Amino acid sequence: MLEIERLVRKFGAVEALAGLDFSVEEGESMGLIGPNGSGKTTLFNVVTGVYPPTSGSLRLEGRDIGASKPDRIVNLGVARTFQNLRIFERLTVFENVWAAQHRRADVALRELVLAGRSAERARRQEVDGLLELTGLADRRDALAGGLPLPDQRRLELARALARRPRLLLLDEPAGGMTPAETEHMVRLIRDIAIPGRTCIVIEHKMEMIRNLCDRVCVLDFGRKIAEGPPEAVLRDDRVIEAYIGREAPADA
Ligand SMILES: Nc1ncnc2c1ncn2[C@@H]1O[C@H](COP(=O)(O)OP(=O)(O)OP(=O)(O)O)[C@@H](O)[C@H]1O
Ligand SMILES: [Mg+2]
């Protein structure tokens, strides 16, 4: 699904990604962990075309996407959520998901062909269905900016799903949540985000990685230091040292 080779991304003197090799198979649920500043979010930013790579290759389903712009990558079926939420605070919950759905090519096309009420009704039903699934139906008409953080994170997930991605990138989807809220998010990801698609989840909460991921990749200083099934990788001395040297992994 996604194949990355020798990827480098520099910011001035900082090598956020320092020759990373990384790949995800279709249908796989991959965990991405590593200490603060190890390059996890940068990897998402490069994959989604926010930052071009300094060097190295990126292939999505065999296509070279190294020089692609964000809009093109969305159209190729990649959606993400953000560590520091990006929602429209002055729009309602419903409008936020509606706006995300609108970026989908098939939605734009259906509107041209079917123009009018039936296309719109189908779109509304789909948005309401997503709000139902993510537990936001009773907040439908609330302004997104006024929601508590866990609801805003669920809204980000609903927005990403509205694009019907084949590859979904989740950046600390339970960041800042209590254990109970985290558990709810784990259920959402397991039940509605992962089935039928390829997922990469960045998380510091190791319990989530254990619960959700088939495989986990560990970054340190922009390189991969370990990879494999969560149980084995989370016992690896280099991984424990990378975390404990600078911070202890937060357990959900
Ligand atoms: N736009 C940018 N400009 C300058 N430096 C950047 C930029 N984005 C990231 N960096 C630097 O690249 C390195 C990797 O950052 P990144 O955000 O990818 O880490 P991370 O693994 O997501 O960390 P965290 O767990 O704290 O979210 C850091 O040193 C960071 O300061
Ligand atoms: Mg990050």
Image (spheres, grey):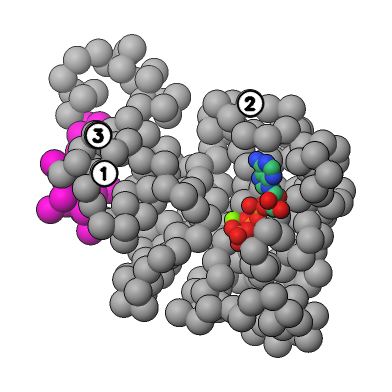
Q: Nearer the viewer, mark 1 or mark 2?
A: 1
Earlier along the polypeptide chain: callout 3 or callout 2? 2
Q: Which secondary structure, mark 1? A: helix
- The residue where tag 1 is placed is 145
Real-space CA distance between mark 1 and mark 2, rounded to the nearest whole angstrom: 28 Å
Q: Which quadrant of the figure shows ligand 2? A: bottom right
Magenta stretch: give its range.
122-141
For image coordinates 74% across by 64% down, the residue present is 219
Prevalent SS, magenta region: helix
Q: Amino acid at mark 3?
A: Arg
On the image, which quarter does residue 118 sit in?
Answer: top left
State whether residue 129 is above or below residue 70.
below
Q: Residue 90 got which mark?
A: 3
Vertical comparison of 56 with 192: above or below: above
Side of 63 relative to 167 (left or right): right
Q: Is residue 86 left or right of residue 90?
A: right
